Amino acid sequence: MTTLRLKRGFLLAVFCAFPLLAFSSCKDTQPVRSAFTAMDTAITAKFYGAEAKQAAEHFQTQIEDLDGLWSKTDPQSDIARLNLYGTLPTGQLDLRTIALLEKSSQLSRETKNAFDPALGRLVSLWGIGTEKQQVPGEGERQAVLERCGNENLMITEDTVSLKNEIQLDLGGIAKGAATDEAVKALEQFSLDGYLLSLGGNVYVHGEKPDQSEWRVGISDPDGKADYLGYLAVSDCAVVTSGDYERFFIQEGVRYHHILDRTTGAPSQSGLRSVTVVCKDAAKADAYSTALFVMGAEKGMSFCEKEDTLDAVFVTDDHQIFLTDGLKECFSLTESERYQVMSEGPA
Amino acid sequence: MRYKKIPLKKGDLLIFGMILLLIAATCIFLFSQKAEGQKYCIISQEHDIIKEVPLFKGKKQTITVSGQYQNIIEIDGERVRVLESSCPNQFCVHTGWITDGYQTIACLPNSLLIRIVSGEDTKVDIIS
């Protein structure tokens, strides 16, 4: 009789355990998602783990806060006030803004101004992606270039000054810098993994519930497929700059938003896109612009000198060049139209 | 070997009842899991979700979103696009159809975000 009672008890335990296990596994595999618009772009994120909900809420608040500091259009932002007044005491600027300006300036020097945070006037002259987009004449471009350039951004202990009437445009670094701030803040939450995308500036951390790596697709510049291939990576930023993002076509010529300071015009480096993989998202953001301007050959040798930097270069004749660190984690899906080159660019 | 028959007691019936309840709960759970494989189109504006539309093959509909500008969203089976927009840059219209969870359509002038959510795994998690 006791044996039978035990058997009943055992059966009951099994019946109870099954749905409980099923429920608990469900809770872990569904991410908490976040989607909103800020920093002039669409922002999406998903979080896995015990504190996913709190992390998602914190992430959105933090990004909106940074948008308030770095927006070019919000007249109250640090950047808009700097552009308006030309000089501000450091006491009137957020410490994060000063850190961002210092980093922007340093990255500009490191890339010999292929990335430059002080091209605001040139960006406004072309107006690409706005109602005022136009192809300015050579004279106009040269005149504006005289009022551009990172060397005019002066940061001292007491003041930040924009000399020579330069205007800041942090479009090539602010989203990356905001990602870095978010990643730092997310350390306080108990999370198994998360994915952040600030308008295609991606950061992936940890693992998905099935313990697989994150797969970040690289946009097909031709737009015939959603992506040409993907990178299987984790704990890093993946940022792409491409000529297909913002552009207009006039008399058969594509004018895109990645401007080359040496010519004052959209970069003609033979590339369609550059994807940078780096732990530092601000660096990844700035370098993706810089490497695009440098072109495949110079860009590849630049990456070789930087241990922490890897990149995928897509040329306008559909060739793909990968730095050594990405050869194992890149998979080509559009193999009929694109070719991964084993030799470096000529 | 013969087992002696044990008459059912109140407690036993309670246990059976509980088991049946748990089986029912499991079935409901599995059914809802299946629903999570269902694709949804989520339309948000500013910080609020304004509409969640389950996507079914063969079902067509249009949704108009107003605000600072107006967007007409077309849903055709499991794909979604912005058909028309009164916004100045028309980026949302030029994005074209989206079909998978890693894609979004944004109309920044109207603070509109359209995305597809599905429990199904896609080959990539996001596009850069």
Image (cartoon, coloured by chain):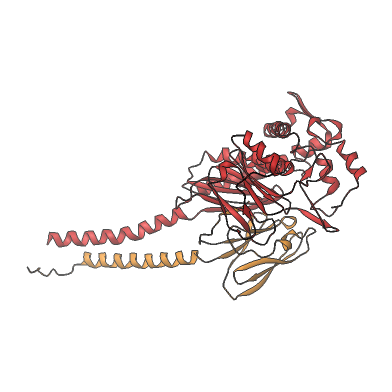
| Residue A279 visible at all | yes
Give the chain letter for red: A
Total labels: the figure holds 0
Please, is residue B110 above or below residue A85 in the view?
Answer: below
User: At 56% across and 41% down in the image, what residue appears?
Assistant: A325
Frontmost residue, A318 versus A87:
A318
| Residue A200 visible at all | no
Q: Quadrant of the N terminus of chain B?
A: bottom left
| Residue A259 placement (x, y as % from top left) | 79, 44
| Residue B53 placement (x, y as % from top left) | 59, 67
Please, is residue A97 above or below residue A204 in the view?
Answer: above
Q: Residue furthest left?
A: B1
| Residue A65 placement (x, y as % from top left) | 66, 42
Please, is residue A331 above or below residue A324 in the view?
Answer: below
Frontmost residue, A14 versus A295:
A295
Please, is residue A164 above or below residue A15 in the view?
Answer: above
| Residue A226 placement (x, y as % from top left) | 63, 59
Question: Is A307 situated left or right of B36 in this image?
Answer: right
Tell me which corner region of the image, top left, top right, bottom left or bottom right, holds residue A159.
top right
User: At 69% across and 64% down in the image, what residue appears?
Assistant: B96
Question: Is A32 situated left or right of A224 in this image?
Answer: left
Q: Residue furthest top?
A: A157
Q: Residue furthest bottom?
A: B58
Frontmost residue, A337 versus A141:
A337
Colour chain B is painted in: orange
Frontmost residue, A258 versus A75:
A258
User: At 72% across and 35% down in the image, what residue appears?
Assistant: A111
Q: Residue furthest right?
A: A139
